[in-house]
Amino acid sequence: MFGFYDSYFLFFGLQITYYGFIIAIGMAVAVFVACKNAKYRGLKSDDLVLGACYVLPLAIIGARLYYVIFADHDFSFGEIFAIWDGGMAIYGGIIGGAIGVILFCAIHKKNFLDVADIAVPSLILGQAIGRIGCYFAGCCYGVEVTDPSLMWFPLSTQIDGVWHYSTFFYESLWDLLGFVILMLLLRKSGIKGRGIVMSLYLIIYGSGRAWIEGMRGDSLYIGSLRVSQVLSIILVVAGVITLTALASLTEQGKIKSIKEKGFPEFVKTQNALALQKRNDRKLKREQKRQNKQDLDSDKTKINKENNNKKNKTDKKIE
């Protein structure tokens, strides 16, 4: 049933790569976390599940197209669709996912800033998990390590027998730190500006990626420029501009604040409903357990009475 190898495992004869499996886990965890966070911007879990139906397919398509466009390889038409052979780029996934969010908001009349604020903590968590898959795929590694004292895991790792800096792990840790920061900000009642969490994602991820990309040994290039490093710098600049603009518009009252939209009250209501549901489930379990105990007690009593009758009958026969 199971078989484990260097880059894949077998499940009932089906070959599943660790890279793809970990990416899938990252997506699933991201959707789950987004559903849990939905209430902080007046949304419901169903909204985020529906939004994921737009975002995830477009993210996969975007990740593949980005790689095909910038990779130093002439892809045939058939090879463009062969994602199982590897070749996905996270920035393409971010662009595709952003298009998915825009479409979802336009079609279902949701506010982009609110949905984006909920989406980005999940996004960066999914990135943190997904980067671990790069270890098994042997991609997204750093430049070669020549100093023997630095040849130890996880600072560096062997790719085809050669030691390289473990840039995939560096980015995973950076993303995990970013997730913690964004989650704290999303749930902090003192933050009143909508879109602030989204803007900070651009700054946090962009700055970390720009630094780590400079250490990569397998970057995608346009001429002599690393594509993702240039895009990371653009992301940071866009994040700073967006953060400043949104803060100013919120102060001027041109964008309703979190309090004005009633999100804190919505959170309290959702928490109260969730608590009531938990209490109801607990009550049902206790009632079920009590009913079982009563039934067992009745059975014991009946068995005891039957035994007494049998004993009396046996004495009469004697």
Image (cartoon, rainbow, N blue to C red):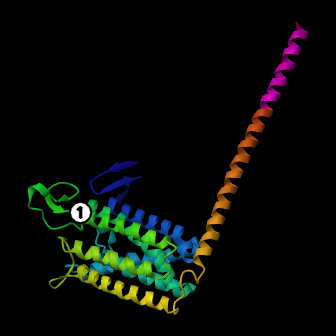
Q: Is residue 267 left or right of residue 204?
A: right
Q: Quadrant of residue 298?
A: top right
The residue positioned 27% from the left and 62% from the top of the image is 169
Q: Nearer the viewer, residue 190 or 10?
A: 190
Q: What is the crowding at mark 1: few (fewer than 14 residues within 10 Å), some, or many (at least 20)? A: some
Q: Nearer the viewer, residue 217 or 39?
A: 39
Which span of residues is magenta-colored?
299-317
The residue positioned 32% from the left and 57% from the top of the image is 8
Q: Position of residue 7 (x, y in %)?
A: 28, 57
Q: Main secondary structure of the magenta part?
A: helix
Q: Position of residue 316 (x, y in %)?
A: 91, 10
266 part of magenta stretch:
no
Residue 75, can we see it?
Answer: no
Amino acid on which disc 1 is placed: Gly
Residue lying at the far top of the rendered structure = 318
Residue 244, can we see it?
Answer: yes
Q: Is residue 60 left or right of residue 215?
A: right
The residue positioned 31% from the left and 67% from the top of the image is 174
Q: Mark 1 sits on what residue?
A: 138
Q: Is residue 177 above or below residue 3?
A: below
Q: Is residue 5 above or below residue 50?
A: above
Q: Position of residue 76 (x, y in %)?
A: 26, 80
Q: Quadrant of residue 57?
A: bottom left
The residue positioned 21% from the left and 55% from the top of the image is 153
301 part of magenta stretch:
yes
Quarter of the image with the C terminus is: top right
Q: Is residue 280 left or right of residue 123?
A: right
The secondary structure type at the circle numbered 1 is: loop
